[in-house]
Image (tube, helix red, strand yellow):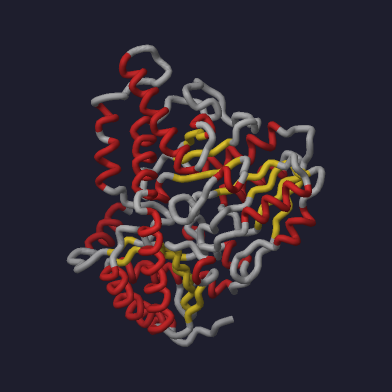
């Protein structure tokens, strides 16, 4: 196995340029973020923040300062509303299970959309085994949730509604404010959670303006370190822990806090919101340059998700007909362009993306989809290189596949 991997890596030698567009799955951490974290591994604040000595007090101060920075960027009322977790997956698990268990006896109905991330879908499926009723709201061909179906789904038994602010795969900016108003009108006691991981740092997002009860955000999706995320819990909303152990500064997530990663998360947040409008406009220009270039140069392609302002500024998801996605990712990688195919969470299983299936894509279209995300660090020259490489890679793969019929 290791020899095969080395052979693959050797095949990448001599690349004239590399463009990393797989931010959905992981990201490179900017030097400013790495530099901010380094002192907290071995120079200061390396202690347990619950202990009464200098390194412990430094750690407690550092975590509180980081919480304050993120709370400010989210629009929180208090820094205690920010609860750090090991990532988006854990935050979503906490949101759904913590709410379900805390609302025991008050209702059994949970409403989500068909295109939620797997860390919501799978938890909902798990909760169904504990007697909860799960209702999945359909979406249209661009991924927008059906608000009338949502209205019909929420009743007096509904304890939780979880709808992403921005879809992680196709970039659809969902009407979450309208959705929340519908939910609260139907049942004011229903808890409203949104996975805002693909909204935070990309579009204007404020928990007070939205009036959400719970919101998930992720560090690596704003180019911070992996292994840390957060769940916003509105003041006054009751939640149960889903893990037990030593309780530190984070009452909802036991264990010793990872101070360096929390610092990195806060620094990444600071950078994401510095020159926010300029950064977003630049990402939007690069996004459109990439979309328009691919559609203009390559026949038989389909954009997945909406166009323009209704799409996240970083997101490009395109299906290439007569072209298998996994083969295309490898071909692109050999030319220094790094993307992902289909659903980031299911690609190893070669299953079609549940998001693309939900918006009406055929299996062959879903399997031929490529997901790319731009950042504030990408340049027009990066995109031009991608537009040079992708048509050649698609032509080569289609040539191998031949005239495979599209079903």
* Figure check: 198 above or below 192: below
Q: Residue furthest bottom?
A: 403
Quadrant in the picture for the C terminus:
bottom right
Tell me what residue is drawn at x 43 percent, y 25 percent. Answer: 256
User: Residue 182: x percent and y percent?
Assistant: 73, 53
Q: Indicate the quadrant where residue 242 lies.
A: top right
Quadrant placement of the N terminus: bottom left
Q: Residue at x 78, y 35 (%)?
A: 106
Q: Residue furthest left?
A: 14
Q: Residue at x 57, y 52 (%)?
A: 118
Is residue 350 something that shows in the picture? no
Of residues 282 and 297, the one nearer the viewer is 282
Q: Is residue 134 left or right of residue 277?
A: right
- Give the vertical position of 212 relative to 290 (above or below): above
Residue at x 65% of width, y 30% of height: 238
The residue most toward the top is 52
- Judging depth in this view, the residue of 290 and 189 nearest the camera is 189
The residue lying toward the viewer, choosing from 202 and 49, is: 202
Q: Is residue 245 above or below residue 81?
A: above
Would residue 125 be found to the left or right of residue 70 on screen? right
Q: x%, y% of residue 308?
A: 49, 70
Image x and y of residue 83, in percent: 51, 33
């Amino acid at each position: 196995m290791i020899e095969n991997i080395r052979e693959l890596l050797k095949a990448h030698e001599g690349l004239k340029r590399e463009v990393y567009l797989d931010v959905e799955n992981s990201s490179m951490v900017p030097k400013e973020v790495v530099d901010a974290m380094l002192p907290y591994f071995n120079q200061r604040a390396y202690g347990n923040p619950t202990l009464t000595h200098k390194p412990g007090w430094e750690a407690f101060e550092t975590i509180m300062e980081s919480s304050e920075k993120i709370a400010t960027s989210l629009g929180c009322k208090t820094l205690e509303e920010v609860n750090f977790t090991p990532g988006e997956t854990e935050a979503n698990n906490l949101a759904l299970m913590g709410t379900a268990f805390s609302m025991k006896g008050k209702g059994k109905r949970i409403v989500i959309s068909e295109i939620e991330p797997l860390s919501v879908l799978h938890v909902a499926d798990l909760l169904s085994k504990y007697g909860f009723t799960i209702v999945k709201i359909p979406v249209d061909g661009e991924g927008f949730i059906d608000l009338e179906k949502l209205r019909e789904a929420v009743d007096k038994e509904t304890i939780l509604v979880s709808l992403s602010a921005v879809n992680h795969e196709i970039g659809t900016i969902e009407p979450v404010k309208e959705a929340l108003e519908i939910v609260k009108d139907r049942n004011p006691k229903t808890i409203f959670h949104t996975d805002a991981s693909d909204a935070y740092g990309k579009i204007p997002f404020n928990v007070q303006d939205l009036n959400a009860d719970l919101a998930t955000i992720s560090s690596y999706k704003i180019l911070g370190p992996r292994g840390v995320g957060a769940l916003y819990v509105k003041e006054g909303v009751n939640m149960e822990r889903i893990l037990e152990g030593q309780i530190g500064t984070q009452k909802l997530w036991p264990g010793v806090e990872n101070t360096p990663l929390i610092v990195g998360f806060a620094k990444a947040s600071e950078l994401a919101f510095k020159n926010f409008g300029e950064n977003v406009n630049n990402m939007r220009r690069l996004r459109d340059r990439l979309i328009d270039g691919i559609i203009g140069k390559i026949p038989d392609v389909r954009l997945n998700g909406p166009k323009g302002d209704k799409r996240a500024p970083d997101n490009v998801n395109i299906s290439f007909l007569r072209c298998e996605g996994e083969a295309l990712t490898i071909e692109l990688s050999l030319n220094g362009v790094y993307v992902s195919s289909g659903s980031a969470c299911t690609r190893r299983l070669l299953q079609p993306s549940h998001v693309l299936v939900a918006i009406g894509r055929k299996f062959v279209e879903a399997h031929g989809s490529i997901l790319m995300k731009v950042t504030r660090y990408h340049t027009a020259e990066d995109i031009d290189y991608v537009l040079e490489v992708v048509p050649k890679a698609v032509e080569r793969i289609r040539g191998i596949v031949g005239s495979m019929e599209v079903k």
